[in-house]
Amino acid sequence: MLMCLAIPARIEQLTADNHAIVNLAGIRKEISLALVEDIVPGDYVIVHVGFALQKLDLIEAENTLALFAELSAFNQNS
Amino acid sequence: MKYIDEFRDGALAQKIAASIAAEVNSQHDYHFMEFCGGHTHAISRYGIVDLLPDNVHMIHGPGCPVCVLPIGRVENAIQLAQTPQLILCSYGDMLRIPTASGMSLLKAKAQGADIRMIHSSADAIKIAQENPRHQVVFFAIGFETTTPPTAVAIKQAQALGLSNFSVFCNHVLTPSAISHILQSPEVRQLNLIRLDGFIGPAHVSTVIGSRPYEYFAEEFQKPVVIAGFEPLDVMQAILMLIRQLNQGRAEVENEFTRAVLPNGNIKAQMLVAEVFELRRTFEWRGLGLVPYSALKIKSAYADFDAEQRFQMPALSIADNKACECGAILRGVKKPQDCKIFGTVCTPENPIGSCMVSSEGACAAHYSYGRFRAEKPITAKEN
């Protein structure tokens, strides 16, 4: 088992006892939402040992990707 | 997969590599430690070192939870697992860690001990519910990422009135380990390791936030850039570290803004604070005794503390003499410096813990790097 190598998973549906079904690259798995708040289907979360640790900020994800892209534009111009 | 593939784009990686190459000062060497095993794995798996100029050196840190647990604690778990009517639950990686005598939890299981591999602390609770006549002990290990799930399990056991569940707590803390490395004689006096900056952990930081690292930046004047675990994240973090050094800055920067907030996950931190307190000292493989570097279960939850419930002697056992895990965890040596690397010690037959976990420096180098040509100028830490 990979202790830290968690990947972002998409919340598919909320289930009983503050759990949710996530889609991890096509694999459906039930995880606990005990450590996060205000999660709705469609959110992406970082899953670690069966728990969502944090909600992914999709705007920040886009910003980071834009930063990489900007960087490459800078390279092309320079 | 969304939010993964974009961060593994090879063309973009080349672009960031070009920026790094353009911005490094060829008169300087840059030595960066990636604290976390997840980054060690990513650096090896994606061949990031091959994208870096020869004067940028990556040093593996001790952030592999399986690797840093000393043999004495593994021996405790093996002895515990041999107790009649006891089920020991463990994350998979721990099962193959060898002790001095070549024993492991996996071998103990083969000899009849009831050891269950679990993927979540919630599994251990379920096993305890299903086996009311057995004592069920969860062998809890890991950094700040795995600690909140253990806290949830203990709270749940209390709510369910589970009298047969307890936790053998081995949770450790990232900031104390970084401090310890920065204060070690190897860094401060002997100059065996040069450390110019740190790549800060990804998932640990989702829990603790970016603030705990500010101390290192200020006190030790070392820049820290928190990075995600994907290869572009790591490349970008290296570029940000280089820029800080070139500009004479030592700040905490966050590349992993999509998951790390300055204050982290407060809900998780509060749960941890409710259930755990600091240990005065704890032994780490490679680092020795590190003050205030680990957690124990608070007396209010003593009913769920395996160290209170069972006789568990304090064992301090030296590593196999031939194994260089200790020096590798301190960043003093590299896997390929170890005489038994890849010969006697392989992932199939690990002698040391760094070869067991996929996050371990030796396992990562064995899987992805051992046929790679060394860089022309080998990075002798000077």
Image (cartoon, rainbow, N blue to C red):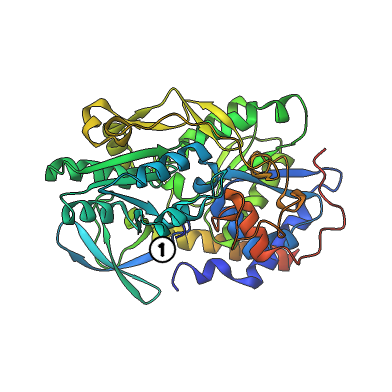
Q: Amino acid at mark 1?
A: Pro
Badge 1 crowding class, 10 Å Cα cut-off, few under 14, some 14 to 19, many 20 or more, is many
Q: Residue at x 66, y 72 (%)?
A: B11
Name above or below for residue A20 compared with residue B67: below
Location of residue B302 (image quadrant): top left
Task: Answer left or right for B165 relative to B103.
Answer: left
Percent position of residue B69, x then y: 50, 41
Percent position of residue B323, x then y: 67, 45
Location of residue B268 (image quadrant): top left
Q: Residue at x 29, y 36 (%)?
A: B270
**Which chain's residue wears label 1?**
A
Q: Residue at x 27, y 56 (%)?
A: B123
* Quarter of the rendering occupied by the C terminus of chain B: top right
Secondary structure at badge 1 equals strand
* Quarter of the rendering occupied by the N terminus of chain B: bottom left
Foreground residue among B160 and A59: B160
Foreground residue among B143 and B102: B102
Task: Answer left or right for A78 relative to B99.
Answer: right
Check disc 1 and report the residue beneath it: A8
